[in-house]
Amino acid sequence: MKVEVEQDLYPSRGDKSGFIKRKEQIIYGTIEQFKKAQLDNKEVTFYKKNGYLIIEKMLYFHELNNLKNEAEKLKKNYLEESENPEIIREIDSKIVRSVYNIHKTNEIFKKLCYSRKILNIAEALLGSPTYIHQSRMNCKDRFDGKGFYWHSDFETWHSEDGMPNMRAVSCSILLTDNNEFNGPLLLVPGSHKYFIQCPGKTPEAHYKHSLKKQEYGVPTKDSITKIIKKHGITSFKAKAGWVIFFDCNIIHGSSDNLSPFPRYNLFFVYNSIYNKLISPYAGTKPRPEFIASREH
């Protein structure tokens, strides 16, 4: 079902800091699509309620090794390169934090993001064909990998990219074990049912700083306190080869990696073809294509 948007349903980046109840459905797929994706009713119900779904052992051993080797090679190759804007480094460091646009620049990662075992799930949750809104490799280096404050991806994609509705899903593929020591993904189950308005005017070219440390487009401490008191926090501690799909609007974040164990993951965002980007709602210029694809 195509959702027509004539106004900003989720105003943010102004003076208000509050909650707006989600205005569209969470899951769009049909029974046939869920069967094709090998998702049972229990899994679909869990995703609808909590905003995320964990798939254990999706990758075979040889696939996982190949992907991990490729990730380490990519990080090493980009260690000294300073001019490529798709390479995001830690603040005040050359350490690679993220490599964007990997579905276009790396054939191994491209093959994975378009594999049917992942696409079938994304298309079932969104109920339509999809395209890649964003892709990246995340590297949280041992001892030095920094965390990311609580946020909703949709708030940024809506405000700074012009994504009209919450009809996108993220897929995070673990290439290393995630434990309580190396900065695992933290989620607030059920928070995807509410849009949290974030105060503050968005600076131009905000992405140059926000991809390292986001200061605009983050909920206030009061808002975070309210949503966590209501829904709690869950930590995605999992083994390499596991995959998590999570709703574009779920509140999530991560802490620093204080351990000697690096954390690598691949991150693909699937957006419905019926949710194509328009002009950013924050009134800023669209972010670069490698962050928010407008090619379908």
Image (cartoon, grey):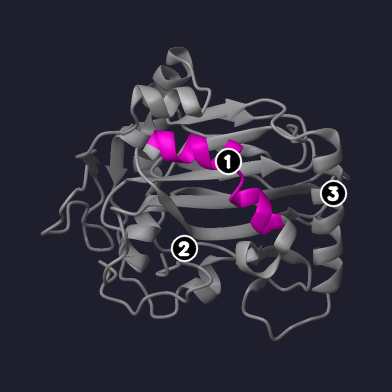
Dot 3 or dot 2: first in sequence order is 3
Q: Residue furthest top?
A: 42
Q: Which mark is residue 237?
A: none
Q: On the image, numbered disc 3 is attached to which residue?
A: 66
- Amino acid at circle 2: Glu
Residue that label 2 marks: 215
The residue stretch that appears in magenta: 109-125
Using the rendered image of the protein, determine whether residue 47 is visible from the camera's viewpoint: no
As measured in the structure, the alpha-carbon distance from the residue carrying label 3 to the one carrying label 2 is: 36 Å
- Give left or right: position of 292 versus 67: left
Dot 3 lies on which element? helix
The reply to whether discs 3 and 2 touch (Cβ–Cβ < 8 Å) is no
Report whether 119 appears left or right of 141. Answer: left
- 54 vs 156, left or right, is right
User: In the rendered structure, which amino acid carries the disc numbered 3?
Assistant: Asn
217, above or below 122, in the image: below
